[in-house]
Image (cartoon, rainbow, N blue to C red):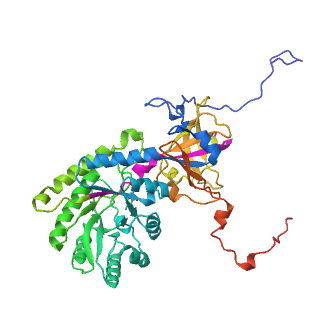
Amino acid sequence: MIDQETSAPARLPWQKPTLTPHRLGGLNKFGSGHHHQHLERVDGVEIRQILKEHGSPVFIYSERRLRENVRRLRRAFVSRYPAVQLGWSYKTNYLGAVCAVMHQEGSLAEVVSEFEYQKARAAGVPGNAILFNGPWKPRRILEVAIPEGARIHLDNLDELFLVESVARDLGIIADVAIRLNFDTGYTETWSRFGFSIENGQAMEAARRIGSSPHLRLKGLHSHIGTFITDVRAYAAEARILADFMAAAESQTGCVIESLDLGGGFASRNSLQGSYLPPDQVVPTFEQYAEAITTALLEATRGREAAGKPRPVLILETGRALVDDAGYLVSTVVANKRLATGQRGVVMDAGVNLLFTAFWYHHEVRPVRQLDGFPEDTTLFGPLCMNIDVVRHSIMLPPLDVGEPLVFSPVGAYNNTQWLQFISYRPAIVLVGEDGQVERLREPEDLASVLGQERLPERFRGPFTASPR
Ligand SMILES: Cc1ncc(COP(=O)(O)O)c(C=O)c1O
């Protein structure tokens, strides 16, 4: 630029220097970042078409994946151990269709509350196909569940006395299991649930049941934690339960028929803070099965010689069966530049729908190949709450308003822990094995939310405040 009067070069206004880091599109030691992948279809059905018909956001489940998962799990165990029974963990996902698939595939119902018990019964599950866990089972539901033949898993001594008194009043004998907690050496002990083996409470409970004319000890149960990637923890659990079984039988004279190892197998998700991708840290069903059944066969070897059958192995696997069968599709509603320089994107689904965003880094994929330079991006939900961040940092290409993003795996614990908070909960659909898309849950609207509210008469009437 030339100054017209002096013909000298003009001075440019001073500008504060900035450094812009040069990002290589999310390259890392495993190759290029995930944003290069996109997901156009679920089991052959176009996601855009589902959005058109059911709105955004929308949850999509794959029936094919669900069935494949449960069949793979069963095969892994049944091929190694003679008697295996699955129990579907309702709290992981109690959508009617998901439970129905699990029951069609041979799973019992594993429930942890009055509501879940009633839900299973309403779906046609007989009482004797229900495993009743949980730290609180009110008397009114025990009075229903015990005569219906549900297997009650006792959590504490007060519950033991309560179940005994219900059975006595009904003049029947209740079949029970006791939930045990103990140190596996590989996991943190969840001692708030069940009876401790180490402090002697567990054997005390077994003896108390053994001496009761109204109770019969039929099973042992434990659930050592969740998202457990070290299969040695399960081998230890199987050994500890088998040893306790032998000790309890000899001290009480009861015959234990089943050992329930609970759930906790990891799903193909990325736990926050985990450096390696799920493919490298999550054991296969075969690896879990090998560890558990080897330990169990070994620990129960003398049983058949003594004329007792080996115990039925019960598994309450939840997240590992349903997580990767579920997708959440959410749409970009706004872009912004944060004070830090970071790009922010506002989506139409937040932590109200995606509770597991608090502990996982889900895969996030557009529904088509997107061009443009990937940039570090924060994904916000639509809630007017600071906590509503579905991803703090992810490399994504530029996203126009209206662009859909697919979050997965999201099939476990989101559609049970989601909240009607600030906005409506959306539709849930299933892509069937035949490629048909069916609604599993209607989206909420004002009427469904107001349906539970009651407005006392004195609050009804015209709006009286006047805007200034
Ligand atoms: C008693 C019991 N069984 C099974 C499960 C299912 O666990 P996961 O989804 O980790 O397999 C849970 C979950 O907390 C549980 O509490």
Q: Quadrant of residue 364?
A: top right
In the rendered image, residue 271, in percent from the top left (x then y), is placed at 44, 47
Q: Is 115 displayed left or right of 341 in the figure?
A: left
Q: Residue at x 23, y 47 (%)?
A: 80
Q: Is 409 displayed left or right of 445 in the figure?
A: left
Q: Residue at x 46, y 47 (%)?
A: 63
In the rendered image, residue 179, in percent from the top left (x then y), is placed at 31, 66
Q: Is residue 24 magenta?
A: no
The number of numbered badges drawn on the structure is 0
In the rendered image, residue 100, in percent from the top left (x then y), is placed at 44, 56
Q: Is 79 displayed left or right of 274 in the figure?
A: left
Task: Please say whether residue 347 is visible from this viewpoint.
Answer: no
Q: Is residue 335 magenta?
A: yes
Q: Quadrant of the N terminus?
A: top right
Does 168 sit above or below residue 190? below
In the rendered image, residue 157, in percent from the top left (x then y), is placed at 32, 76
Does 9 sit above or below residue 415? above
Along the line of sight, the residue nearer the viewer: 222 or 61: 61
- Magenta region: 313-341
Identify the residue at the far front of this view. 434
Q: Residue at x 88, y 17 (%)?
A: 4
